[in-house]
């Protein structure tokens, strides 16, 4: 399964368990409170591990892109016709500043990375 969907599913389960824990606290059902507390701790740990793994993968991808020899900011006309640009430059990687990858690299404008000058 995809890390993103795993994190989302675990967060949904965590919210559900927290709501059940609130109900169990109101009814003072000690068995349910213990079970739900253990489940919440397990889900919290699982989410933290998945986020760390996702961050590691993103960091590795960012290092590969930054290692490419040539990079420059793309003009508005190049951004408008991205298909043409990608066909003319083999292996072009475009990084947008609002994506997680763009934030990881630290770009402020749409930037293209490639092996050859373009």
Image: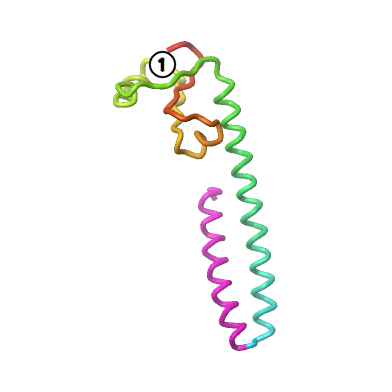
User: Any magenta on residue 23?
Assistant: yes
Left or right: residue 47 compared with residue 83: right
Q: In the figure, residue 33 lies in which quadrant?
A: bottom right
Total numbered badges shown on the rendered structure: 1
Looking at this view, is 20 or 107 the one in front?
A: 107
Task: Tell me the residue at 33%/21% (across/down).
Answer: 78
Q: How many C-alpha atoms fall within 10 Å of the one at disc 1: few (<14), some, or many (≥20)? A: some
Mainly helix, strand or loop, the magenta region? helix
User: Any magenta on residue 78?
Assistant: no
Looking at this view, is 94 or 105 the one in front?
A: 105
Q: Quadrant of the C terminus?
A: top left
Magenta residues, start to end:
1-27
Residue 94 in the image: above or below residue 30: above
Residue 82 in the image: above or below residue 115: below
Residue named by callout 1: 89
Image coordinates for residue 63, horizontal then vertical, percent = 60, 28
Image coordinates for residue 27, horizontal then vertical, percent = 60, 88
Task: Tell me the residue at 30%/24% (across/down).
Answer: 81
Colouring of the image: rainbow
Left or right: residue 46 compared with residue 16: right
| Residue extending farthest top | 117
Identify the element where label 1 is drawn: loop
Image coordinates for residue 64, horizontal then vertical, percent = 58, 26
Q: In the figure, residue 41 lies in which quadrant?
A: bottom right
């Amino acid at each position: 399964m995809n890390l993103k969907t795993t994190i989302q599913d675990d967060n949904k389960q965590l919210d559900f368990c927290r709501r059940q824990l609130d109900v169990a606290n109101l009814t003072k059902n000690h068995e349910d409170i213990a079970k739900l507390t253990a489940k919440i701790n397990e889900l919290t740990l699982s989410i933290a591990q998945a986020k760390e793994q996702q961050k590691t993968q993103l960091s590795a991808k960012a290092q590969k892109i930054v290692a490419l020899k040539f990079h420059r900011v793309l003009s508005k006309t190049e951004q408008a016709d991205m298909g043409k640009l990608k066909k003319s430059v083999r292996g072009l990687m475009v990084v947008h500043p609002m994506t997680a990858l763009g934030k990881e690299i630290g770009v402020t404008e749409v930037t293209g990375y490639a092996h050859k000058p373009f």
